[in-house]
Image (spheres, coloured by chain):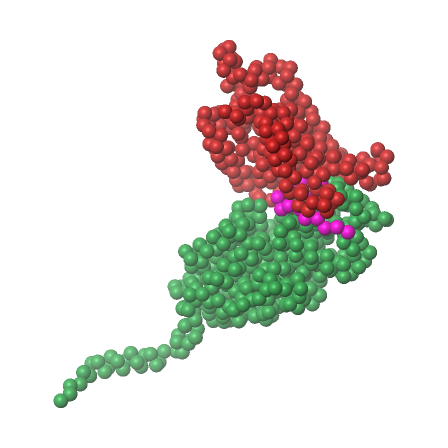
Chain colours: A green, B red
């Protein structure tokens, strides 16, 4: 004789649970649920999601880091539906509604990179391991960006690079989990070359002073190849120590050479000092074989141009973005004014290009997660791959899948002769269209790298 | 030949800064026996005296200019310096233009006060401690000082130009018969060189021809005997610390138009200045000056294109190579005295 364990009450309970399960909307049982909460590093589980902003808060780039943090804070406000929404209203993708990311309120933690690779990796690791950051962004140095990008790849975290200009970030050191909105050395060279030819002619002799580190090398290589392709010759190229403060002994040989253009492949304090010294030695007033001597600074930084004061007058360079773009060049650069309005109202001055790229990267990440329906890095990777967007201040932009580099117009600027205030130091000379600065993913200046596979981590 | 002359000129102005900082450094070492790693910070504080004085002169009130718009489209706020209203616009603008030289007046008492406070408040407690302790505490102090400056002034360099009359350069080559434009030299660097020469001469004259200086020199030679004679040598040495701080500070003030000051500039000079002191001879004032100019010129020559083609990278190590050679051949430095730091 067998005895059944079924009871009337038991069958009813089981039936009720099974029925409720079958009746549940599929959204809670689909891939969205599974991917949104498990299977990758720092999968958000509560009603908040944490982003990690890793910027230089001490050291020589601290002011640029502070501007990046302002932009991140503003982006988080806008994502959470606070403030005026900034570029959310102009962004071509309408996935973001100011309700956080996938309904989770965005919160953030910050780290101090000190503009040192080891310190930056330590602070990024802390944000990932202790604070549970699901994405890391920021930077003001290519060395730091490359180091943190590699860490994020290992950890299974998305890295949305801030200001990093070296070719290597999306070249030989590119990673599947890393994405760069900012332009690069190649683009600076390609954007500047036609403008330099138009302004100064095709028969010029250039002398390069190059900061003795990775970014300096890639920038010199890019500018040299672009300018030599249009007929310029390079008479000399000298590497200068990163710690150099007085460049007079490097400027003096320029006077002795036959050069009629000085290219300063310097950034930050190096740029301020070398440019100041070059102007002090009368290079701007000099004539060589009947040609006016010119100085070129491939990568401009508004924040650092302030340090050079009046010395930037007339100096050509390139930028990723400028806060005057939409006012001067029209609706193609929509989003610029919305961002300047938000940032200016909150902080009292216009944003730098470093602030802009950080703000945009945060929005792009949030948008990718929303479109993918998941925080999973591999889902974000797919959503950003070959993503075309507009309305974020740079005009139509492509996030190329092959190297995770954004392709967009590049702004060529010149130091103003009579700036009206400390925030209006440069004037826009021209914008070089994106197709003129686009290159093949296997271009020699970017060779030797591979994205590899996206890593979701845990 | 013109390249050589130009690099000598470059070396002289660079050497001027090294010599002024090293002079104060070796003065402190010679009197108090303290290895002061905060001396570079004093140079930086001097530079920020110029920045502060310049900002004080430009203290302004805001006027709304309805005819102009700011970047947000609001009526433009225009800053009008108070000094324009006190002295008139042209006189006020002239005073602001001369802010850097005028700030010497503020820097002298401020830097002496900072030096005295530093010595009485902190460093005197470390006289009998090992040199390693002195280095640690003064290095820590230097970091604290630069972080304070960064907190108030930010990390970016702050442009502090020379008076308009000294902006630009002159054609030294044409003056001495070379091709026009072959030797161009900025006016302010020449001013800096002469300024350094005057300060160095003044310090030597002060030590050589005043009673105070004579007592200090006697104290440097034999502190115990001078104390037994009833002279409060500590008080005089404290004053010398103040004077050394002022020398570093004045060097910083006048350096601001050459390179925009930032909070880190002291550290940039500190290591080189120590090399200068060691090469010149610990505690030797003429040695510090001689080594300062010598290393400035050597460094300038090492950056010449012709030299770099033969010895790539020599510009980054040449000063240390010279230091090694000097210390191997003259272990006490060029003009070092027997017994200093040899106990």
Vertical relation: A351 (above or below) A9: above
Q: Is residue B148 visible?
A: no
**Image point 54% across, 68% down: which residue?**
A452
Q: Specify the farthest residue to the bottom.
A: A1
- Residue A390 rendering spot, x and y as whole percentages: 61, 67
The N terminus of chain A lies in which quarter of the figure? bottom left
The question of residue A388 being in magenta is answered with no
Vertical relation: A65 (above or below) B106: below
Vertical relation: B82 (above or below) A58: above
Residue A191's image quarter? bottom right
Q: How many marks?
A: 0
Q: Nearer the viewer, residue B255 or B286?
A: B286
Q: Nearer the viewer, residue A44 or B97?
A: A44
Q: Specify the farthest residue to the left.
A: A1
Q: Specify the farthest residue to the front.
A: B329
The C terminus of chain A lies in which quarter of the figure? bottom left
- Residue A126 rendering spot, x and y as whole percentages: 44, 54
- Read off the magenta span: A235-251
- Residue B255 rendering spot, x and y as whole percentages: 66, 34
- Residue A394 rendering spot, x and y as whole percentages: 64, 63
Q: Nearer the viewer, residue A386 or A225?
A: A225
**Image point 52% across, 13% down: which residue?**
B226
- Left or right: B176 in relation to B65: right
């Amino acid at each position: 004789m067998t005895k059944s364990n079924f009871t009337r009450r038991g069958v009813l309970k089981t039936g009720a649970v099974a029925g409720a399960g079958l009746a549940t909307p599929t959204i809670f049982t689909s891939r969205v649920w599974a991917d949104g909460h498990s299977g990758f590093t720092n999968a958000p589980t509560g009603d908040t999601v944490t982003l990690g902003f890793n910027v230089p808060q001490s050291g020589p780039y601290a002011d640029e880091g502070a501007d990046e943090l302002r932009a991140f804070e503003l982006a988080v406000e806008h994502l959470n539906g606070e403030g005026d929404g900034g570029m959310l209203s102009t962004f071509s993708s309408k996935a973001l509604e100011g309700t956080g990311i996938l309904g989770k309120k965005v919160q953030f933690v910050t780290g101090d990179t000190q503009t040192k690779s080891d310190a930056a990796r330590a602070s990024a690791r802390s944000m990932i391991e202790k604070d549970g950051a699901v994405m890391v962004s920021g930077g003001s140095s290519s060395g730091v960006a490359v180091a943190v990008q590699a860490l994020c790849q290992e950890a299974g975290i998305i890295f949305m690079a801030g200001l990093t200009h070296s070719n290597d970030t999306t070249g030989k050191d590119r990673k599947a989990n890393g994405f760069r909105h900012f332009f690069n050395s190649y683009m600076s060279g390609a954007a500047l070359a036609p403008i330099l030819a138009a302004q100064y002619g095709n028969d010029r002799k250039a002398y390069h002073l190059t900061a003795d580190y990775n970014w300096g090398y890639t920038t010199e290589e890019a500018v040299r190849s672009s300018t030599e392709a249009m007929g310029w010759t390079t008479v000399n190229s000298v590497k200068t120590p990163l710690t150099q403060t007085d460049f007079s002994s490097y400027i003096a040989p320029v006077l002795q050479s036959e050069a009629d253009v000085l290219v300063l492949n310097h950034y930050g304090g190096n740029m301020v000092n070398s440019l100041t010294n070059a102007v002090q030695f009368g290079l701007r007033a000099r004539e060589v074989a009947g040609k006016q001597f010119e100085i070129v600074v491939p990568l401009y930084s508004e924040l650092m141009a302030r340090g050079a004061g009046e010395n930037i007058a007339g100096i050509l360079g390139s930028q990723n973005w400028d806060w005057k773009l939409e006012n001067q060049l029209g609706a193609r650069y929509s989003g610029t004014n919305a961002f300047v309005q938000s940032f200016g109202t909150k902080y009292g001055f216009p944003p730098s290009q470093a602030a802009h790229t950080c703000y945009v990267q945060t929005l792009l990440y949030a948008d990718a997660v929303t479109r993918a329906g998941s925080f999973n890095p591999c889902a974000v990777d797919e959503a950003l791959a070959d993503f075309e967007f507009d309305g974020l201040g740079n005009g139509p932009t492509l996030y190329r899948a092959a190297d995770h580099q954004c392709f967009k117009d590049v702004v060529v600027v010149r130091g103003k002769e009579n700036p009206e205030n400390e925030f209006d130091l440069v004037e826009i000379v021209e914008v070089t269209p994106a197709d003129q600065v686009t290159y093949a993913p296997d271009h020699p200046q970017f060779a030797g790298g591979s994205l590899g596979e996206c890593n979701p981590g845990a | 030949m013109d390249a050589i002359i130009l690099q000598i000129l470059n070396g002289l102005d660079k050497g001027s800064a090294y010599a002024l900082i090293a002079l104060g450094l070796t003065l402190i070492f010679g009197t108090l026996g303290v290895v002061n790693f905060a001396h570079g910070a004093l140079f930086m504080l001097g530079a920020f005296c110029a920045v502060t004085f310049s900002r004080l002169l430009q203290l302004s009130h805001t006027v709304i200019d309805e005819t102009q718009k700011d970047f947000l489209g609001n009526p433009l706020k225009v800053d009008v310096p108070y000094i324009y209203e006190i002295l008139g616009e042209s006189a006020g603008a002239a005073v602001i233009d001369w802010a850097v030289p005028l700030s010497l007046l503020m820097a002298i008492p401020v830097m002496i006060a900072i030096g005295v406070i530093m010595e009485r408040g902190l460093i005197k407690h470390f006289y009998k401690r090992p040199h390693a302790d002195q280095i640690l505490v003064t290095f820590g102090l230097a970091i604290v000082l630069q972080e304070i400056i960064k907190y108030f002034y930010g990390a970016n360099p702050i442009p502090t130009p020379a008076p308009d009359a000294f902006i630009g350069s002159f054609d030294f080559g044409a003056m001495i018969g070379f091709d026009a434009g072959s030797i161009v030299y900025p006016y302010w660097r020449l001013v800096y060189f002469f300024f350094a020469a005057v300060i160095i001469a003044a310090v030597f004259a002060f030590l050589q021809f005043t009673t105070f200086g004579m007592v200090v020199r006697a104290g440097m030679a034999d502190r115990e005997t001078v104390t037994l004679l009833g002279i409060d040598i500590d008080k005089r040495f404290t004053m010398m610390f103040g004077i050394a701080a002022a020398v570093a500070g004045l060097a910083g003030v006048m350096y601001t138009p050459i390179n925009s000051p930032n909070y880190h500039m002291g550290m940039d000079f500190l290591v080189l200045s120590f090399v200068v002191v060691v090469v010149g001879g610990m505690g030797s004032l003429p040695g510090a000056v001689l080594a300062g100019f010598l290393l400035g010129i050597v460094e300038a020559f090492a950056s010449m294109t012709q030299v770099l083609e033969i010895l790539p990278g020599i510009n980054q190590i040449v000063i240390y190579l010279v230091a090694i050679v000097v210390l191997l051949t003259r272990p006490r430095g060029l003009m070092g005295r027997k017994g200093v730091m040899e106990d």
